[in-house]
Image (tube, rainbow, N blue to C red):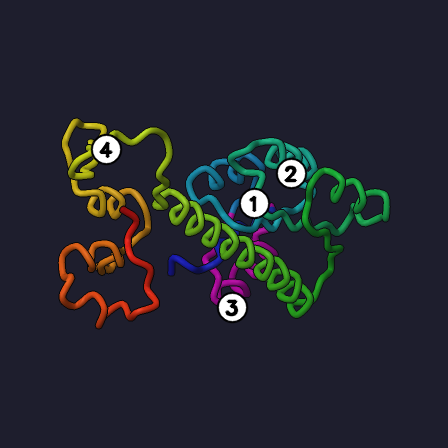
C-alpha cells in the first residue's frame, strides 16, 4: 500500500464528498475526507495527500486561498490540487485558480468517468515524479560512494608503501583499492623478469624485447 496514491476530498456537501470518496476508493486510491477548510489543513498535516480534490466554496474558507497557502509552503507545494466548482466556472475564475497554482480545474456537474480520468492523469504525473526522485536518490548514493584519489600521497622511496591519513603504512595496491574503484591483477614488467628470472627472460619476452637500461 506504500505505493498507493493518497487523495484528500474536500467538500462541504456530504453526499458529493461521500460519493466522490467512494468512487476513488473503489478505483484503488487511499482516501480521506474533509468538510471545511480548517479540517482540510488538519488532514493535510497528518495524512499528507498526493492529490487534493478541493471544492472552491467552503463554509469557512475560499478554495483559492487554500490553494495559494499550500503552493506557497515548501512542505506542501508538491501536493497536486484539482479544484472543483459548480458556481465559479467562468474562464476568468478558472484561470485565476490555475494561476494560483492549481494543477487542474473542473466545472460541476462532472461525470464519474471524467473525474476519474482527471485523477488518473494526475496520478501519472505523480508516479513520474516519484520515479524521478527515486532515480535522483540512487544517483546521489552512487556519487557519494565513488572514491577519488587526490592530493599529496606520502610514499616510501624503498618499499613503495603509502602512509594513510591515520599514519599507517599500507601496500600501494591496498591503499588504492580502498580509495578508488580499482582492482589489481598482478604480473611482472620486462625489467623484473630479466632481473628475477634471467634464465627464462628470452623465452618469456622474446628476442625483440629491449634489454633494461643500465
Circle 4 or circle 1, nearest the eye = 4
The mark nearer the N terminus, 3 or 4, is: 3
Left of 40 or right of it: where is 68? right
Q: Which of 89 and 121 is in front in this view?
A: 121
Left of 196 or right of it: where is 1? right
Q: On the image, numbered disc 1 is attached to which residue?
A: 79
CB atoms of marks 4 and 1 within 8 Å = no
Left of 126 or right of it: where is 204? left
Q: Residue 67 carries which label?
A: 2
Which SS class for mark 1? Answer: loop
Q: Which mark is residue 155?
A: 4
Q: On the image, numbered disc 3 is attached to which residue?
A: 27
Which SS class for mark 2? Answer: helix
What distance separates the C-alpha of mark 3 from that of mark 1?
Answer: 20 Å
Q: Is residue 67 above or below residue 207?
A: above
The mark nearer the N terminus, 4 or 1, is: 1
Furthest residue to the front? 214
Circle 1 or circle 2, nearest the eye = 1
Q: Residue at x 36, y 45 (%)?
A: 146
Which SS class for mark 4? Answer: loop
The mark nearer the N terminus, 1 or 2, is: 2
**Residue 180 screen position, x and y as percent:** 32, 46
**Residue 2 screen position, x and y as percent:** 38, 57
Q: In this view, does 102 lie above or below 126?
A: above
What distance separates the C-alpha of mark 3 from that of mark 4?
Answer: 66 Å
Total marks placed: 4
Range drawn in magenta: 12-33
What distance separates the C-alpha of mark 2 from that of mark 4?
Answer: 63 Å
Circle 2 or circle 4, nearest the eye = 4
Amino acid at each position: 500500500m506504500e505505493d498507493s496514491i493518497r487523495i484528500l476530498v474536500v467538500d462541504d456537501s456530504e453526499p458529493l464528498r461521500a460519493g466522490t470518496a467512494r468512487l476513488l476508493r473503489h478505483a484503488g486510491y487511499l482516501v480521506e475526507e474533509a468538510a471545511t477548510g480548517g479540517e482540510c489543513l488538519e488532514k493535510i498535516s497528518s495524512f499528507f495527500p498526493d492529490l487534493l480534490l478541493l471544492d472552491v466554496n467552503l463554509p469557512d474558507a475560499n478554495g483559492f486561498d487554500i490553494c495559494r497557502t499550500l503552493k506557497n509552503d515548501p512542505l506542501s507545494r508538491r501536493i497536486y490540487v484539482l479544484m472543483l466548482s459548480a458556481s465559479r466556472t467562468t474562464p476568468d475564475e478558472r484561470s485565476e485558480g490555475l494561476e494560483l497554482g492549481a494543477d487542474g480545474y473542473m466545472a460541476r456537474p462532472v461525470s464519474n468517468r471524467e473525474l476519474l480520468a482527471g485523477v488518473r492523469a494526475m496520478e501519472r504525473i505523480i508516479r513520474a515524479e516519484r520515479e524521478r526522485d527515486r532515480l535522483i536518490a540512487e544517483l546521489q548514493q552512487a556519487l557519494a560512494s565513488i572514491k577519488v584519489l587526490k592530493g599529496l600521497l606520502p610514499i616510501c622511496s624503498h618499499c613503495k608503501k603509502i602512509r594513510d591519513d591515520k599514519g599507517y603504512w599500507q601496500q600501494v595496491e591496498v591503499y588504492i583499492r580502498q580509495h578508488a574503484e580499482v582492482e589489481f591483477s598482478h604480473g611482472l614488467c620486462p625489467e623484473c623478469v630479466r632481473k628475477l628470472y634471467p634464465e627464462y627472460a628470452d623465452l618469456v619476452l622474446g628476442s625483440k624485447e629491449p634489454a633494461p637500461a643500465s
